[in-house]
Amino acid sequence: MKNTEKVLCVKRESLPEEWVREKSVVRTDAAAFFKICAGTGHHWMERGVVEQDPSFKQIIPYTIVQTQDGSRTAVYKRKGGEKRLHDLWSAGVGGHINPEDKKGFSDSFEGIVLAGMTRELDEEFVRRPENSPSTFLGIINEETTDVGRVHLGAVFRITAGRDAQFVPGSELVDFQWMDTSALHRLSMEQWSRLTLELISLYDQPGGAPGQWE
């Protein structure tokens, strides 16, 4: 059956070249990301169509949860709707942006993406801290898999004071906190590996992208 779900997309040709290379791990600030994407003229496309059309990139907010010192990271086993990622470990919670996320934001690309990120977190966690800030880290992209060719990751990080503040829903299978230094031993999805690489860039000396409450 054709997937008629509408998802937020941008045209690949309108994006900076460094964002859509075979492997892209790009540290950038939130203002630059939202300005560039808004300027491309975003589109609402049928997911069943754009899953087969790499001329469009589906925007995916991808959120990693870590302890405040970064020493531990929340991970889970993939078992959701994306069968191509099943049984891989993931350190990111993400999903497509749908028209329902547009409510109250008109054509504000920033507002729509942030609303979609919040909705996805609310769907995946039974409980999470009400005032946990999310920090925008940058962009990830890979062109080596069927999934990667048609998606672009906008990476956010949430830091947690106590593990127990996050209670996972049923789709976050085998949810657990692991030492960040040990994650390389897991069979992880490509985006999680790219996100950890992005975090290593972000945590180097230099300015910090914007924070969202």
Image: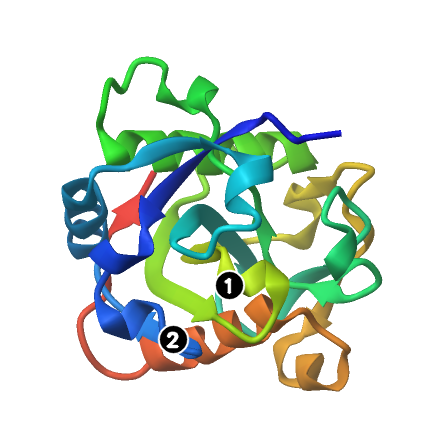
| Image quarter (top left, top right, bottom left or bottom right) of the C terminus | top left
Residue 25, numbered circle: 2
| Amino acid on which the number 1 mark rests in the picture | Arg
Judged left or right of residue 78, residue 3 is left
In primary-sequence order, the first of circles 2 and 1 is 2
Q: Along the line of sight, which residue is nearer the eye, 97 or 40?
A: 40
Give the image location of residue 132, x and y in percent. Answer: 46, 42
Residue neighbourhood size for the residue with mark 2, other residues' Cα within 10 Å, grouped as few (<14), some (14–19), many (≥20): many
- Type of colouring: rainbow
Residue ID at (35%, 54%): 135
Give the image location of residue 139, x and y in percent. Answer: 36, 64
Give the image location of residue 201, x and y in percent. Answer: 35, 80
Judged left or right of residue 208, residue 158 is right
| Amino acid on which the number 2 mark rests in the picture | Val
Q: Quadrant of residue 113?
A: top left
Residue 62, numbered circle: none
Residue 149 seen: yes
Q: Along the line of sight, which residue is nearer the eye, 119 or 178?
A: 119
**Element at label 1:** helix
Residue 157 seen: no
The span from disc 2 to disc 1 (Cα, nearest Å) is: 15 Å
Nearest to the eye among marks 2 and 1: give it.
1
Contact, CB < 8 Å: mark 2 with mark 1? no
Residue 149, numbered circle: 1
